[in-house]
Image (tube, rainbow, N blue to C red):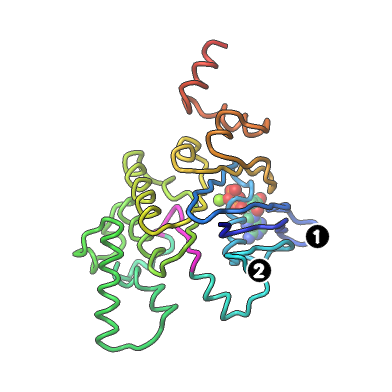
Amino acid sequence: MTLLELRDLRKEFGGRHGIVAVDGVSLRVSEGETLALVGESGSGKTTLTRLLLRLLEPSSGSVHFDGVDLAALSPARLRRIRRQVQVVLQDPYSSMNPRMRVTDIVAEPLVTHEPGTRGRRRRVALKQRVGELLDAVGLPPENQDRYPHEFSGGQRQRISIARALALRPRLVVLDEPTSALDVSVQAQILELLADLQDRFGLTYVFVSHNLAVVRQVADRVAVMRQGKLVEIGDTARVFDAPAHAYTRSLLDAVPNLDPRRARRRETA
Ligand SMILES: Nc1ncnc2c1ncn2[C@@H]1O[C@H](COP(=O)(O)OP(=O)(O)O)[C@@H](O)[C@H]1O
Ligand SMILES: [Mg+2]
């Protein structure tokens, strides 16, 4: 089933003589899959993800989520749909209030989107939900009252994943989620993301410039260049038989991405 569909999506910045950050992109994302978005810096990956969250208005084209055109929704319905799409960024620290405790950081989306009652019962329910979320991301519950600076980068990324899951989203946009982490920590976070995807039936749009990571996690890969989608296909096909010269040049820039490719180069 198609969960997300972009049709001829375009975003210009800076008026008529500005730049075209996203230039006529059409693609579909199926429920439960991981679609990787790759391409050099400035190719429009982040802008595309902001368009699909509707944090940015497209200049033209449309975004359908679960069959619904987001542009046609009232603000209230857009808010309800938007909570089904959450985002995890490269640097979670920048989006965390350093004076908030972990429990409040993870609870923040719940408090914002489900205001409801205050009172003791509400507090107990929130605390329990935060406990479940921290458990799901592998952080012991005794961390609830600590502050972001007391954690390692990997633990902070776990906190931001817990926060992203608080509203039980269906689609999670991961924008370079492990790029700031050491390789060993990166592997743990990737394992956690795979685990959560299975457990909660999540759909991922995974932005990364790390093609080794992409090969490991993605079902399909979309390659962007200068705002355009140059190629999209199953991960194995894109890596083994790239259809576009630009994709080939991206792959060739990565040493030892795949033993077969490396051998081919050595013997060439
Ligand atoms: N808010 C903005 N205002 C003007 N230009 C922007 C803005 N956001 C991104 N851009 C430009 O759009 C292009 C694509 O940027 P971005 O989507 O961040 O690429 P990527 O994530 O692939 O590195 C770049 O040229 C960038 O400078
Ligand atoms: Mg980016």
Q: Is residue 21 above or below residue 129?
A: above
Q: Position of residue 147 (x, y in %)?
A: 28, 65
Q: Is residue 192 left or right of residue 31?
A: left
Q: Earlier in the sequence, mark 2 or mark 1?
A: 1
Q: Position of residue 110 (x, y in %)?
A: 39, 75
**Given the image, on which type of amino acid does mark 2 rest?**
Asp
Q: Are marks 2 and 1 in contact (CB under 8 Å)?
A: no
Quick check: is the Cβ at mark 1 less than 8 Å away from ligand 1?
Answer: no
Q: Give the residue displayed 27% in from the left and 81% down from the top.
A: 123
**Given the image, on which type of amino acid does mark 1 rest?**
Arg
Q: Quadrant of the N terminus?
A: bottom right
In-front residue for pair 117/106: 117
Q: Is residue 241 left or right of residue 203?
A: right
SS for callout 2:
strand
Q: Position of residue 242 (x, y in %)?
A: 62, 31
**Numbered label attached to residue 16:** 1
Nearer the observer: mark 2 or 1; the answer is 2
Furthest toward the top, the residue is 267
For label 1, the crowd category at 10 Å Cα-Cα, with few meaning under 14, some 14 to 19 and many 20 or more, is few
Which region is colored magenta? 84-93
SS for callout 1:
loop
Q: Is residue 238 left or right of residue 98?
A: right
Q: Position of residue 72 (x, y in %)?
A: 67, 74
Q: Give the residue displayed 48% in from the left and 60% down from the top.
A: 87
Q: Give the residue displayed 59% in from the left and 50% down from the top.
A: 45
For label 2, the crowd category at 10 Å Cα-Cα, with few meaning under 14, some 14 to 19 and many 20 or more, is some
Q: In terms of image quadrants, where is residue 92?
A: bottom left
Mark 2 — residue?
69
